[in-house]
Image (cartoon, rainbow, N blue to C red):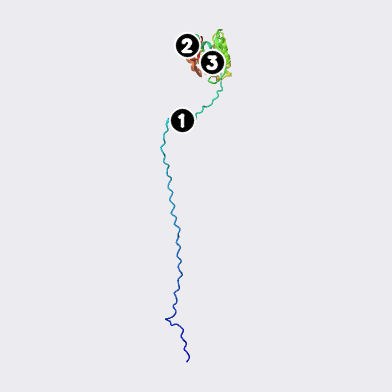
Amino acid sequence: MAKSRRNTRKPANQAEQKEPAKEPAKTPKKRNTRKKSAPAPKPEPPKEPVKEPKKEAPKEALKKEAVLTTPEEKPVVILDQSVAILIDGNNIEMSLHSVSGKKGAMINFDKLVPALLMNRALSRLIYFREGKSISQKLAERLQKLFHGSVVPCYKSADIPLTIKAVQVASKVDTIIILSGDADYVELVRHLKHDGIRVEIAAFPETTADVLRSESDFFFPISVDYSFVLK
């Protein structure tokens, strides 16, 4: 008998159980390790600086600082004026004797002339005097210090002085008349009309008010500008 072939097939119940298909391993999602940046803080409004109360410095300290920081500078002024001084010798001498009460008193021109000029240039100085008894020492003194001259007058000095003032008016800026006599009022008005500055220097006690008011400037002479001959 022919050998029966063995049924090599496995029974259905014994069929090879197929292994379930393995699902591919899920790769774990990478966690975002980056830390979420915190939201930028809102800029705070600028704080106003606290104003400290000012300490008041003592007045003496302020004065010192003012001197150190802002020194006062005196303005430089150039006085470009020429001056003529015309002297009525008789009027000035009589006024001095009346005010001082001393017959031997004389005007100290060494002191008076610089005070009259006030840093201006002296163009000429003329001393008019009536009579022949003119002090030679005075004439020499005026010539030596101021290149001045003494002019003897036949009578009063008002006419010669007036003529000389009109002659020199075009050569100077200012004319100073040493006299308090009201006879010079018309001369003062005439000179001012021509643009000349006119000043009067005399003793206030013996000066006419009209002459004083007509002048551009009045210089009061006192006994401090005199000396007594011994």
SS for dot 2: helix
**Which residue is nearer to you in this view: 25 or 96?**
25
Q: Could one spot residue 144 in this view of the protein?
A: yes
Q: On residue 102, which mark appears?
A: none
Q: On residue 100, which mark appears?
A: 2
Q: Nearer the viewer, mark 1 or mark 2?
A: 1
Asked whether the beta carbons under mark 1 and mark 2 sit within 8 Å of each other, the answer is: no
Q: Earlier in the sequence, mark 1 or mark 2?
A: 1
**Which residue is nearer to you in this view: 205 or 10?**
10
Q: Which of marks 3 and 1 is in front?
A: 1
Task: Specify the farthest residue to the top.
Answer: 132
Residue at image coords 54%, 13%: 87
Q: Earlier in the sequence, mark 3 or mark 1?
A: 1
**Which residue is nearer to you in this view: 167 or 152?**
152
Q: Distance between the residues labelled 3 and 1?
A: 41 Å
Q: Could one spot residue 198 in this view of the protein?
A: no
Q: How crowded is mark 3: few (under 14 residues within 10 Å), some or many (20 or more)?
A: some
Q: How far apart are marks 1 and 2 (CA)?
A: 47 Å
Amino acid bearing label 1? Lys
Q: Quadrant of residue 130?
A: top right
- Name the spot of residue 152 as percent of width and height, x first: 57, 9
Amino acid bearing label 3? Asp
Where is mark 3, residue-wise?
110
Where is mark 1, residue-wise?
64
Q: How far apart are marks 2 and 3 (CA)?
A: 19 Å
Q: Which of marks 2 and 3 is in front?
A: 3
- Name the spot of residue 39 as percent of width and height, x first: 43, 53
Q: How crowded is mark 1: few (under 14 residues within 10 Å), some or many (20 or more)?
A: few
Q: Which of marks 2 and 3 is nearer the N terminus?
A: 2
Amino acid bearing label 2? Ser
- Name the spot of residue 139 as percent of width and height, x first: 57, 11
